[in-house]
Image: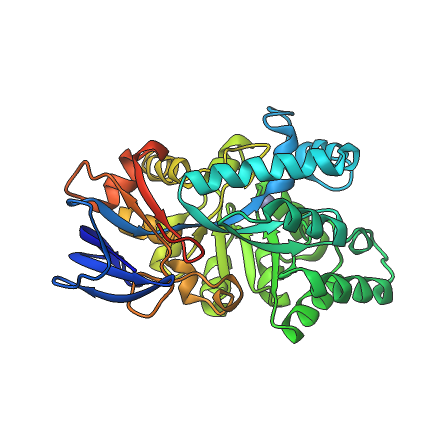
Amino acid sequence: MFTISNGIILKGQNLTPVRENIVVDEGRIIEIGKDSKEGKIIDVDGAIVCPSFINGHIHIGDSIIKDEGYGLSLSEMVRPPDGVKHVALANASDEELISAMRQSMMEMIESGTTHFIDYREGGIKGVKLLKKAATGLPIKPIILGRDDSFYGDDPDLGKVKKAIQKLLKVADGIAPSGFGEITSEVAKLIVDECNKKNKISSIHVAESESNQIESLNKSKSTEIEKGVKAGFSQLVHLTNPKGIDLDEVSKSKQNVVVCPRANATLNVGVAPLNKMIKLNIKPLLGSDNVMLNSPNMLRELEFTLKVMSVYYRQYINPADLLKMATTNINYYDINDIVQKSLIKEGDFAEFIVFNSFSKNPYLNICNRLETKNILYTINKKFNI
Ligand SMILES: [Zn+2]
């Protein structure tokens, strides 16, 4: 048992700042209060206590080819099966993949991340490799798998269904790359099978303008419309929405993930975060491919804060931004699988204690902090 005393706690779903103490026992927050004190007392003297980060979207497998292919187009880089990334993955040994993935997880742990949602390539074997790489580390991978049988204009649906069912025995959900690579029948199968097993179905949508135009030309509906209609539990990117795309997402209450640094690296645009917030969409932030970006959420937060001002000539509220890396996941049913806690009594202790440099705790985190300013990461798996 221990007490983090005298910190500025960003409490509950809304990250409400209060100067109180937190008592942790066997990985759970048992009490929060001005006078609460039990066990070892750790006086943090005005430091900020923030929920640990969730990285909402990442491809950790391409940690093996950091910065390769810079300057190529989105499809040249990542479209299966011939993109730079897929060729590299196909040629990597298991040992190389495991060691590169483990290194990326260490980087995430060091920079305050305790949960990440991964699009894992390579079928069942790919899922198992990530599990092996994560063994013993204080971080929770939520693994969404895929299978090569999904692709093509006329896939064998019986085979696809079997592949999904087998994958769901080891994975937390399914995530094909995008609607450019799969048919609407395959999309429906993925969503149906995931729903039956209470797992996550996720897909990239509207990452680039050309994806959207290709989709409109082919089927008269945007990728976002297709994602909403198919009922995926999570939609990733929405960088280039059209017409009433975002209104539809808001109504459907699907979880959304945005990846501003990855979109910038591939020069495909900036997701309209303020519009999403206005429509009551609660996005998560993701760092996307490790080949494009470091998986450090502090870097994602600072970049997003600044790029919103530059691109839209409008500020983003830093409290809303910080929720995208922490508590927005708690709004969604998929948190049953993710299992990310809030800072509140009874929840698991999953929080970071940061140095405080300014009076605004949100800007302090999004605008100033670096990994070296983390004083403690408390994770339910590990007591200090
Ligand atoms: Zn992605």
Camera-nearest residue between 244 and 71: 71
- Residue 350 in the image, given as x and y percentages of width and height: 37, 56
Camera-nearest residue between 319 and 276: 319
Q: Is residue 74 above or below residue 232?
A: above
- Residue 110 in the image, given as x and y percentages of width and height: 43, 38
- According to the image, what is the colour scheme of the structure? rainbow
Outermost residue on the bottom side: it is: 196
Residue 168 visible, this angle: yes
Query: Within the image, what quadrant is residue 170 found in?
Result: bottom right
Instruction: Identify which residue is drawn at 73% across, 61% down.
Output: 167
Q: Is residue 12 left or right of residue 188?
A: left
Outermost residue on the left side: it is: 35
- Residue 113 in the image, given as x and y percentages of width and height: 43, 46
Instruction: Identify which residue is drawn at 16% across, 45% down.
Output: 46
Instruction: Identify which residue is drawn at 70% across, 33% down.
Output: 96
Q: Is residue 147 left or right of residue 174?
A: right
The quarter of the image that holds ligand 1 is: top right
Query: Within the image, what quadrant is residue 174 found in?
Result: bottom right
Query: Within the image, what quadrant is residue 104 found in?
Result: top right
- Total residue callouts: 0
Outermost residue on the front side: it is: 39
Instruction: Identify which residue is drawn at 47% across, 63% down.
Output: 339
Q: Quadrant of the N terminus?
A: bottom left
- Residue 67 in the image, given as x and y percentages of width and height: 59, 25
Residue 222 visible, this angle: no
Q: Is residue 366 left or right of residue 85?
A: left
